[in-house]
Amino acid sequence: MTVRLPVTDYDLAATLGSGQVFRWHPRNGVWEGILGNQWFQLRQTHDGLEVEASGPVPDLQPLRQFLRIDEDLNAIRATFPKDPPMEAALSCCPGLRLLRQDPWECLASFILSSTKQIVQIQQCVTLLSERFGEPVSVPANCSPSFAFPTARRLATATEAELRGCKLGFRARYLGETARAVDANAVDLGAVGRLSTPRAREALVGLPGVGPKIADCVLLFAYGRQDAFPVDVWVLRALRCLYFPNRHPSARTLDRFTATHFGANAGYAQQYLFHYVRTHLGRQGLHSNAPRGVPSARRIRPT
DNA sequence: GGCCAGGTGTACC
DNA sequence: GGTACACATGGC
């Protein structure tokens, strides 16, 4: 079955390919992925998106929520600072959207992300799903697909099995966090009802989860647009584009990211991240490039 | 072969 | 409080 979702200003490729999600893949001009236990194929059209699904007509509400299709992107972009780097980022990918992911899948995926390239994260997540996820019904001409493994399933996987998915030292973190979530030591549903600083605190308590990964989950799964993940790319972007020829401390950068980018700072962050990765590259961000990640371990005040 | 990747945990000062 | 290093693996 095919359904049309009318929407303007939606850049599907930038959205699904900007390192927020790791299980959507381009194939012959369309994007294929799994949401829950449902296989979808998405195609960008001139006036929106075209959706193919396997099996009988599914409830499209989860897909609409995931894609955040009903959101007023212009209103969000209007809150971004009017400065040259931000203008450049905005013009490079006008229809980039944030997604709203399942908290567990997002958390588990980003635990794998530390010092890995996006392609490698995709590879790990695919292996995990193939080995520990439930099979999902797909159209006849498509390769087998699997749901993202539950916390319960990963909680019982051995560290050797997880390492077999090329997780390396992250295997222990994922196993321990899966057990914590399965045992409800951290209730991911309840986290969504906490204030952003409290939610961040709860997530940072999990093995392998520091401020950066917590902010990714807050932003990409819980829709907390005040969360501002700072990874090596964003750090380079901040230093090069906003503090050229200076050496801002971690504290200075913290204050800057908490105030300069407005109410939807996390959204702005995604534009910067995608812009510098796709248009500037490492070479384009040479100025006082960092030698490592920021040492800040900040919990922002409310 | 060396450097780097959507970092975190730990030891040490 | 900050700094340095280990931690797996693969692409370039």
Image (cartoon, coloured by chain):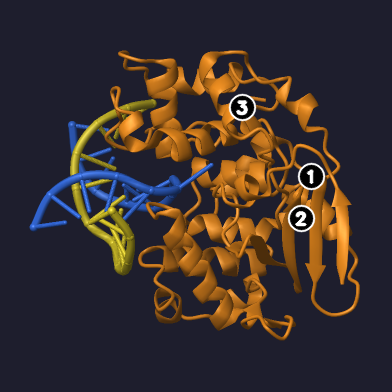
Chain colours: A orange, B blue, C yellow
Q: Position of residue A7 (x, y in %)?
A: 83, 43
Q: Nearer the viewer, residue A61 or A52?
A: A52
Q: What is the secondary structure assignment of the residue under circle 2?
A: helix
Q: What is the secondary structure assignment of the residue under circle 3?
A: helix
Whether marks 3 and 1 lie on the same chain: yes
Left or right: A37, with A240 as reference point? right
Q: Nearer the viewer, residue A228 or A204?
A: A228
Q: Position of residue A146 (x, y in %)?
A: 65, 78
Which one is earlier in the sequence, the residue at label 3 or at label 1?
A: 3
Dot 1, how many residues are within 10 Å of its Cα: few (below 14), some (14-19), or many (20+)? few
- Identify the residue position indicated by label 2 in the image: A189
- Identify the residue position indicated by label 3 in the image: A90
- Identify the residue position indicated by label 1 in the image: A193
Quadrant housing the C terminus of chain A: top right
Dot 2, how many residues are within 10 Å of its Cα: few (below 14), some (14-19), or many (20+)? few
Chain assignment, label 3: A
Which one is earlier in the sequence, the residue at label 3 or at label 2?
A: 3
